[in-house]
Each structure stands twice: as structure tokens, then as C-alpha cells.
Amino acid sequence: MDTSSYTLEDLTEEVRNRYTSKRDSTVFILFIDKYAVDQSFIMLDSNENFKGMLSMGEDEVTGEPYEDDDSDQCPSEESYHSRLSSDIEDDRLNYEGETYSNVKRNSTMKVYSRFSNVIDFRRALNHHAITNEFDYFIEKSEPTRFTARCINMECGWKIHASLMEDGITFQVQEHSCIRSNKAGNRRATQGWIANIVTDKLKSDGDVGVPDLMKWISKTYNVELPCHKVFRGKEQAYTDVYGKWEDSFVMIDDFKEELHARDPRSVVDIEFEKDGDKKRFLRFFISFAACSTGFLVGCRPNISLDACHLKGNFNGVLAAATAIDGNNSIFPVAYGVLESENTKSWTWFLELLERAIGTPNGLVISSDMQKGLEVAITQVYPNIEHRECIRHLYSNLKRHFHDDFFYFKLWGAAIAYCVNDHDRLLDEIDVVRKEAITYLNDNHNKIWSRCKFGTTSKCDYITNNISESFNSWVGDLRYRPVLDLLDAIREKLMKRFDKKRRNVKKWKGSLVPMAKNYVRTITKNLGEYAVSRSSDNRAEVTYKGKRWDVTLDEKKCSC
């Protein structure tokens, strides 16, 4: 049950449907706090009381005690909202006066301290118990009053809270019994974990569950099971970025807003319909600034890749990334797909083709993801399709492990000369003919520089352009889909503005990367011997090798 959306009216309706056939019957719902020593029936007559009742059961629903948890496995980070999560608490109410709305910063309970509601108070009490390393039991728990004592009966510590006209006031005695959190304080609930890790997640990005466990143990001297920290982390993301469901509800409005801001942009969304219902599948964005910038300022070389999202959608973030004139990444298009398959990649590439067309000499580089090869053949049948050598070798070494294959294959990949490429592959063929057969059968795309076309003027043999984009947006992948798409839009806007300001500082007609490259290759030119045959043609000799160079045609026999 999602306690953040479930109301007293929902419970009443469920009880009426299950236990009575008369729709006009009157239903009274009462409950007993089983943890309270002085137990009595309490009537639920308002949503506020109902939320208070849910918060009283927080300790029960947040998981088993640490000592009973014998599993060393952490829940998968691919699931943003665990189905076991059930103690998400209500938002705090605003309250004037000395309040404790941020309980992680206030571990001292003072007389006459005031809290905005019972949930805030219980969180503060849990935090106070954890930071002072003791536990307590509830003696009386009602929506209007609360009494608890230290679990050590020899200790005289007691706290009482009651609803007053001016808020909730508390009277606290000094706690001085034996303290220990090493067994895992059961007051460290999911809500408490969410409170204390929120700031850390904001500052450090997506911190893993094992690292959060170590940080909590070091900071608060409490050891917690993996599954409890995981669910607390999930709730922290929900508190900061909202629910995943809300993200999908507003995604149509997001599309329309992008179109309204710039009609030249290519933005599309696809749903899967089931009767009157529809389920989100895919989203594509190529801003006019990105597509136009690619066509007029970048080489016709695009890297395609997709990385898994770390959220409840369990989809992938797909991107088409180019490189600008200064060899920096230039995002052309991005989107969210339900998975990597032929249908989703075909949909993505069709929209990419609508945004940029088919520039002369277009090259698409990829890691040969699932369904991508077929999609490229369907949408871009005549372009040059390159395969990343790093992923190619990763597949090859599963069958052929020796370092010999590593050096020969990478040597063949970086070779500009066809003769050098063929010689290295022949050496592999002599040692293991099966390796060459495997390459021909499974990796028949272009992966060597000597086979590259010359129009794109890009000799990258890996797909590191896409890897750089994935790293650039890495901290955003845990966000809900709408937040993710909009956060990337904001990063693009800031990146382009920064690039514009940097360009204004450049001097000369060459970009800094080109200047450095020319400076590097012009060193030690005295070792080259040039024999001219005409004004535009010459033979160049270097260390026993000779090349025919034609300047006006920009050709070299190398």
C-alpha cells in the first residue's frame, strides 16, 4: 500500500465493499496501537488521524531486524521503487514558531519544543534515539498524545507529547542508560534514512547502497541491513524529485511546451494503447540548436549508444552524439526507450533522420547493440557503419584469450595502410584460423582505419564519444523520466552558452585543438625527404618508406 496516496476515504470504501452489501451503511473504523502498553480503541474520524495511525506502524513495515537478516544480497539498483516499500510518510505541514522541520539537524529534544505534526515528532524522536544510541518503547500512542519510555526499565527517561492549542509541546528528561547501536537500532526507519541521506545524495550524486551503509555506520554508529538502506534511498529520491507516476502524467505537456518554444525542434512521444488506457514507451528530442549545429559545424560522424536508467521505468537512455570542430562532444539527439530492440531503435533513427537528414559521407558508429544493426540498415541503408574495436575485441577474447590476439587485432584496427592491416590479420590466421572465421561471421562491419571513408575526416576506432556522453549525464539517470529529459535539456543549454563565451576568446582561424595538432605533427619534419615531380605532386620518403602525395586532390598513397 502506498501510504502517501492512500486516504481514510479509500480505506472506508474498501471496508464497505468487502464487509457489507449496503452502500448507504455507516462504517466506523477503530484501531489499537499494539506497541502501546496502555491499549485502547481509537476511532479514525479524519485523514490526519489516519496518517498518524500509519506512522505508528512504521517500525513494523520497514523490514526485519538486522540480526534476522541473513542475506548478503543488496536489492537491484534498477528498481527505483521497491514493492516492499510501504512506510513513506506524509509531507510536513508549515508551522510558525520554533519547529523541527529538518530532524536530521536536530538531535536534542527540549522542553516546549514544537513540531508541525505527529510525523515530524516521531521522526525527530527516532533521530534523537539513534544519535544518542538508545531505544524506547511506546507506552501510549494516540493522534492527540504520545508517551514513550526507555526500553531499559532501570532508566528513568520518559517523553510525553500532547496536542496543544499552540502546537505540540514536549517534556524530556536526560537519558543516561547503556547505549549501543551496533545491533542495528530499530528506530532507524526508512523515513529516518531518507532524511539523513538526502543532502548527501544531492551533493555526491548517485551514491551506492554499500557506500551509504558505511557512511551511516561511521556517522551515526548504527549498522543497518542493505535492503533497509536501499528503500530509504528510494524514498529520499521520491522526496526530492517526486513520484515516477507523476512524471508520466505530465509528459504530454512537456512535449507540447518544447514544440511551443521552438517549432523547428523534432520532439515525439509514443504510447502503447490498451483500450482507453495508454502506457508510456518512448520519447525523442532533437532541439533545433543541436540538429542545425551538427549540420553546419560538425563532421558527419555520429555515435549511437544507450545506457540503462536507474529508475522504476527500467528503460534506456539513447543518444546520438557527434564531435564539434574542437573535438568535444556535441549531442545531436537523445531520448528514452523502453528497451534496446529493433523496433525502438528504428523509431529513434527515423526521428533522427527527420532532424538531420542524410548528410554527405555520414558515418554511424556503434557498439552493435541489440537490434541496432537491423535498424540502421532499414533507416540508413547506404551510410558507412563502423563498429567499436573495444567491444569487438571484448567479444573476441571470450573465445580466444591470448594477448597475441589483442596486439594483432588492435594493430590491424589502427593501421592506415591496407597492406599492414592484411599482414596482421594473416599472422592471426596462421596461429588460429578459427579466429579469422569468427571475425568474418560475426563482425563484418568496418572497424579498421584503412577501410574508413575520407569524407567524415574522423578516424576514431572506438565509441568513446558515446561513452563520454553517458558519463556527462551519469548523475541524472536515477531521476524520473520527465526530470531526466528536462535536466539534460538544461545541461545542453548551459553547455552551449559556455561554448559561445569560450569561442569569443579564441584568436586566429584555427580552433585550439587544431593548433595543438598542427604544432605536434610539424615537429621533426627534417627527417622527411621530399622529391617534387610537379607543383602539386611529390614523393615523400621517411625511414625507408615512400608515399605519393597529390596536394590539389588532397591524396596520399599512405
Image: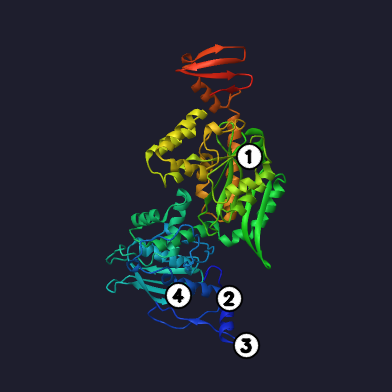
Which is nearer the N-term, disc 3 or disc 4? 3
Rendered residue at 69%/41% (across/down):
357
* Residue 480 spot, x, y in % from top left: 56, 56
Q: Assign a secondary structure to mark 1.
A: loop
Amino acid of disc 3: Lys
Q: Amino acid at mark 4?
A: Arg
Q: Nearer the viewer, residue 107 or 112?
A: 107
Q: Say few, some or many: other residues with alpha carbon within 10 Å of mark 3 (under 14 / 14 to 19 / 20 or more).
A: few
SS for dot 2: helix
Q: Secondary structure at mark 4?
A: strand
Provide the residue designation for mark 1.
383
The residue wearing badge 3 is 22
Distance Cα–Cα, label 4 vs label 1? 73 Å
Number of marks in the image? 4
Up/down of 308 relative to 414, above or below: below
At label 4, counting other C-alpha atoms closer than 10 Å, the crowd grade (few under 14, some 14-19, many 20 or more) is: some
Left or right: 355 in relation to 170: right
Of callouts 1 and 2, which one flags the residue occurring earlier in the amino acid sequence?
A: 2
Instruction: Answer with mark 1 or mark 3, whichever residue precedes in sequence.
Output: 3
* Residue neighbourhood size for the residue with mark 1, other residues' Cα within 10 Å, grouped as few (<14), some (14–19), many (≥20): some
Res 12 visible: yes
Residue 286 image-quadrant placement: top right
Give whichever of discs 3 and 2 has the lower sequence position. Answer: 2
> Which marked residue is nearer to the observer: mark 3 or mark 4?
3
Q: Nearer the viewer, residue 320 or 350?
A: 350
Mark nearer the viewer, 1 or 2: 1
Among the two numbered marks 4 and 2 on one chain, the one whose residue lies closer to the N terminus: 2
Q: Position of residue 151 (x, y in %)?
A: 32, 72
In which image quadrant can residue 330 be found? top right
Residue 193 against residue 395 in the figure, above or below:
below
Q: Which residue is mark 4?
A: 145
Residue closer to the observer: 120 or 432: 432
